[in-house]
Amino acid sequence: MPDCARVRATVRGRVQMVGFRAFVADHARGLNGTIANRPDGSVECVVEGPADAVDHLVGLLHDGPAYARVEAVDVLREPYRGDLPPFVVTS
């Protein structure tokens, strides 16, 4: 699909228990993907959609909501597959 992208991002820092997943979900309207807390304290986001919207969301991951403290964002670009559900917060 032209002009579509898929990204898997791991966000590290104070990103759990600060509304990070809800913040991302609010900004991911119209995109497909998931965001979940990881056991190591990070948050993992997998997102697909129009490349410009995906890139904008990745930029927001570097800031997060007011109480978050993002220390690192590891971004892995993957081939677009079109197999993700409408954006949802998971565990």
Image (cartoon, rainbow, N blue to C red):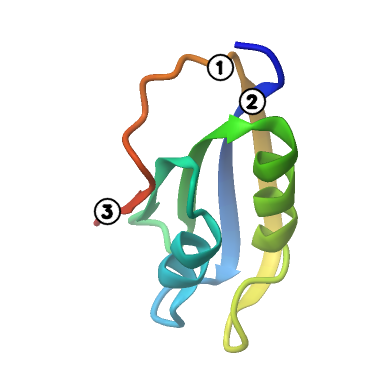
Up the image or down, 23 lies above or below 9; here it is below
- Mark 2 and mark 1 lie on one chain; the one further toward the N terminus is 2
Q: Which residue is mark 1?
A: 80
The amino acid type of the residue labelled 3 equals Thr
The residue shown at (70%, 32%) is: 51
Q: Nearer the viewer, mark 1 or mark 3?
A: 1
Tag 3–tag 2 contact (CB < 8 Å): no
User: Toward the viewer: 27 or 8?
Assistant: 27
Tag 2–tag 1 contact (CB < 8 Å): yes
Q: Is residue 31 left or right of residue 11?
A: left
Up the image or down, 46 lies above or below 42; here it is above
Q: Which residue is mark 3?
A: 90
Q: Few, some or many C-alpha atoms within 10 Å of disc 3 (few <14, some 14-19, many ≥20)?
A: few
Helix, strand or loop at label 2? It is strand
Q: Is residue 91 left or right of residue 63?
A: left
Q: Few, some or many C-alpha atoms within 10 Å of disc 1 (few <14, some 14-19, many ≥20)?
A: some
The residue shown at (67%, 44%) is: 53
The amino acid type of the residue labelled 2 equals Ala
